[in-house]
Image (spheres, coloured by chain):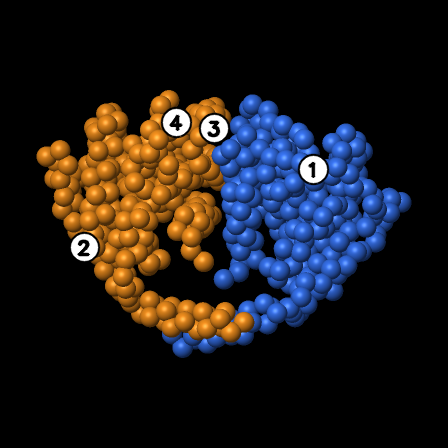
Chain colours: A blue, B orange
Amino acid sequence: MKIRALAMILMVIFLGTTAEAKVVTRSVAYEQDRVQLEGYLAYDDGVTGKRPGVLVVHEWWGLNEYARGRAEQLARLGYVAFAVDMYGKGKVTRHPEQAGAWAKEVNSNVQNWQKRALAGLEVLKREPLTDTERIVAIGYCFGGATVQQLVYSGADVKGVVSFHGSLLAPPAELGKQVKAKILICHGAADPMAKPGDVERYTAAMEKSGLDWQLIIYGGAKHGFTNPDADKAGMEALAYSKSADQRSWADMQVFFKEIFALP
Amino acid sequence: MKIRALAMILMVIFLGTTAEAKVVTRSVAYEQDRVQLEGYLAYDDGVTGKRPGVLVVHEWWGLNEYARGRAEQLARLGYVAFAVDMYGKGKVTRHPEQAGAWAKEVNSNVQNWQKRALAGLEVLKREPLTDTERIVAIGYCFGGATVQQLVYSGADVKGVVSFHGSLLAPPAELGKQVKAKILICHGAADPMAKPGDVERYTAAMEKSGLDWQLIIYGGAKHGFTNPDADKAGMEALAYSKSADQRSWADMQVFFKEIFALP
C-alpha cells in the first residue's frame, strides 16, 4: 500500500508537469536516393530524457495536416513522433488521381518503397530524444501498407499498426530478422478490400509465423480515421468516429504491451 | 492542474482501499423451466454502492473452476460478476462427448437457449449491488455463442464479448430492441471455424446494422483463453498466453467505452 501510494503521488507530480508542457514540432529535411524529403517531428518538451519513438506514415495524399496532427497526438501521449515524407518535399494533394500517381511511383517497386520508409526511420533513430530500442511505426491507407512493408524489410521496429491499409501478405520467404508485431485495423465496409481478401491475408499470415492481429470494425469504410475522408468525394471513403476512437484505443493497448507500460 | 492533482490523490485513497479489500463469492440457486440451476456470484466488498454487472457464460464443460475464476477476476476489476449455469446444478465435465451432449441439449432450440441465458441475467439484475442500467455479458466457446444469442434475443445488455465462440450470424429479422454492442475475439487457427466463416459472418453483420467488432488473433486455436485447454487432448484446443492477455485487455477497452470509464 505505501509503495502504491507513493507511486501514485509521483504520478500526480509527473502528470502535473506534462499537463502544462508544450508539444514542440519542427520540420526535418532529409534525402533518399537523391529525392529531397521533408518530414515533421513532434515531442513534448515537458517530458525529460529518451522516450519511445513512433514513425507516422501518411495516406496517399502525402504528408498533410492530418498526418502532422497524428504526430502531435502521439507527442502528447509522451512519444517522440516523426511523420515521414514518402513522396518529396511539398508533394501534398487533395486530388485522388494525383495521389494515386504519387503512391504508384513509390510502391510500384517494393525495394524502393521499403528504402523510402527506412530513410524516414533513420531520421527518427538519429533524433537524440528517441529510445532507439523502442520504436514502432503506424500508417494510414498507403501508409498502412508502407508500415507492413517496413516489417517485411526486416526493419528494426518492435511493432507496426496499419489503419485502413491494404491487407498485404508477406513474401513467401521472410528473413529471420523479421520480428515486429503487427496490428491491422481494418474497416468491414472498406471496398478497397476485395471479397476473400481477409481470408487470404489470414491464411498467408498464419503461414508466416509472424505475431499478428487483425481488427475488423463493423460499418467502417476506407479512411475511417480521417475526419476529412468524406470531403474527397469518393464513395469508398468515410470517416467513422467510433472506428477512429476504437482503433486509436486499440493502438495504445498494443503500444502498452510492446513497451511494457504499466 | 489543481483538480487533476486532487483527482489523483483521491485515486490513491481509492486504490489503497480496494487493494486490501476481499472478493466475496457465493453460490446462487435459481430455476428455469423446472431445471434447477446454480450460478456463482463474485464482487469486491471493498467497493461500495452499485456497480456495473458482468454475466459470465461458461464453456461447453459447464460452470467449472475456469468460469468461476473469470467471475473473480471481474470482481477484482470492480464489477459484480455472475457466472451463470446453462446446464443444471453440478453438471460439469472434462469429457468432450458429455460436454457436447449437454451443449446440444441447450442450443438445439434457440428459444430455450436464449431463455436459459436470460434466466441467469435476471439473477444478476436482482442482485442489489448491480447497476441494472450497466450490464454486459461475456462468454467462452459455447458461452461465446450464448452471449451472441443473448444480443439477438433483445436482452437488456449494453454489450457482449465472445471469446472463441462460434461466429453466429444474426437472424434475418432483428427486433428494434436489439442494440447491444458486440465484440468477437476469435483465434485465427481455430479449426471450429470453417473456411469462409469469417467473411460470411462479416457480410451478415454488415447487413444487420448492429455495432460489431471482430478481432482475429494470429496463431490462436480454439479455447485460447483457458490455461487448461491443452489438457482436453483435442487437437483443436490450445491455450495461447498472448491471445489470452490481449483479448482480456481488449475486453477492458470495450467495457471502458460502454461504461464511459475514465
| Residue identified by numbered label 3 | B206
Q: Could you tell me which quadrant the N terminus of chain B lies in?
A: bottom right
**Mark 1, other Cα within 10 Å: few <14 / some 14–19 / many ≥20:** many
| Residue identified by numbered label 2 | B26
Sequence-earlier tag: 3 or 2: 2
| Chain under disc 4 | B
Q: Residue at horizontal 23%, vertical 48%?
A: B124
| Chain under disc 2 | B
Q: CA distance from mark 4 to mark 1?
A: 32 Å
**Mark 2, other Cα within 10 Å: few <14 / some 14–19 / many ≥20:** few
Q: Amino acid at mark 2?
A: Arg
Q: Residue at horizontal 64%, vertical 68%?
A: A21
| Chain under disc 1 | A
Which residue in the rendered view is the most extreme toward the right? Answer: A34
In this view, the residue in front, B208 or B45, is B208
State whether residue B212 is above or below residue A133.
Answer: above
Q: Residue at horizontal 39%, vertical 27%?
A: B169
Residue B169 is labelled as: 4
Q: Position of residue B78 (x, y in %)?
A: 33, 58
Judged left or right of residue B57, residue A239 is right
Residue A142 is labelled as: 1
| Chain under disc 3 | B
**Mark 3, other Cα within 10 Å: few <14 / some 14–19 / many ≥20:** some
**Mark 4, other Cα within 10 Å: few <14 / some 14–19 / many ≥20:** some
**Is there CB contact under 8 Å for labels 1 and 3?**
no
Q: CA distance from mark 3 to mark 2?
A: 41 Å
